Amino acid sequence: MSHDFEVVGSELLLDAPIIAVRRDEVVMPGGTTAFREIVEHFGAVAIVAIDDAERIAMVHQYRRSVDRRLWELPAGLLDIKGEDELTGARRELQEEAGLAAQDWSVLADIITSPGFCEEAVRVFLARDLSEAPRLAAEGDEEADMGFAWVALDDAVDQVISGEIANSIACTGILAAYAVLRGGRTPRSVDEPFELRPKSMAGRRLGPDLKKL
């Protein structure tokens, strides 16, 4: 019989604009309790936007946590109160890549760091692309963001070689390859995103959930 990891206490340690940290006291097998620190997150969306030549829209963005620029998919936080995942993905694709898409499906739902963080990301496949007015960038890193079209085969090679190391990009690229070359079927955008975190969004009043 599976153990029920009941939470018997919880303390908010940090409440910052895009993350929070709490400490949960959890009942462990045998009846003892243990503390677990959890990084709370809004959740996010990412987009594998692929054109008729099977090229993927990629962005090159500086990430302070690793002190380098990473090749990534267009992506962003679900930080607008009540916004659904597809609407967020459409907004991020236009903002970061200047693109719109007519054909949308779901490639993967992933938990990026389940050992300590509740961040979950829905990765979309976007096809039938057209240019769209690029929305104004809100962050400093976005103002320095690069952009390139990368052939699907080249992107897969770059995942294998380690040149593309962002976990969301790796998942999206390999899943897109499985769909386009391996005959796998992506999911409907109507399927609920059950992994989407609720802790921070439930406490914040919005509409901009980043504001404390």
Image: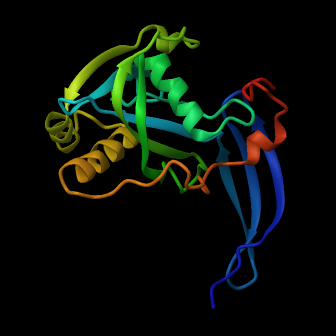
Q: In the rendered view, would you say 162 is above or below 76?
A: below
Question: Residue 32 or 117: which is nearer the viewer?
Answer: 117
Instruction: Please report the residue visible at 47 percent of the width from the left and 52 percent of the height from the top.
Output: 188
Which residue is the extreme one toward the bottom? 1
Q: Quadrant of the N terminus?
A: bottom right
The structure's colour scheme is: rainbow
Asked if residue 203 lies left or right of residue 182, the reply is right
Instruction: Please report the residue visible at 66 percent of the width from the left and 48 percent of the height from the top.
Output: 197
Res. 206 image quadrant:
top right
Res. 163 image quadrant:
top left
Asked if residue 167 lies left or right of residue 115, the reply is left
Give the image location of residue 125, x and y in percent.
Answer: 38, 41
Instruction: Please report the residue visible at 29 percent of the width from the left and 32 percent of the height from the top.
Output: 50
Asked if residue 152 lies left or right of residue 128, the reply is left
Q: In the rendered view, would you say 145 is above or below 101?
A: above
Q: In the rendered view, would you say 88 is above or below 183?
A: above
Give the image location of residue 51, x and y in percent.
Answer: 26, 29
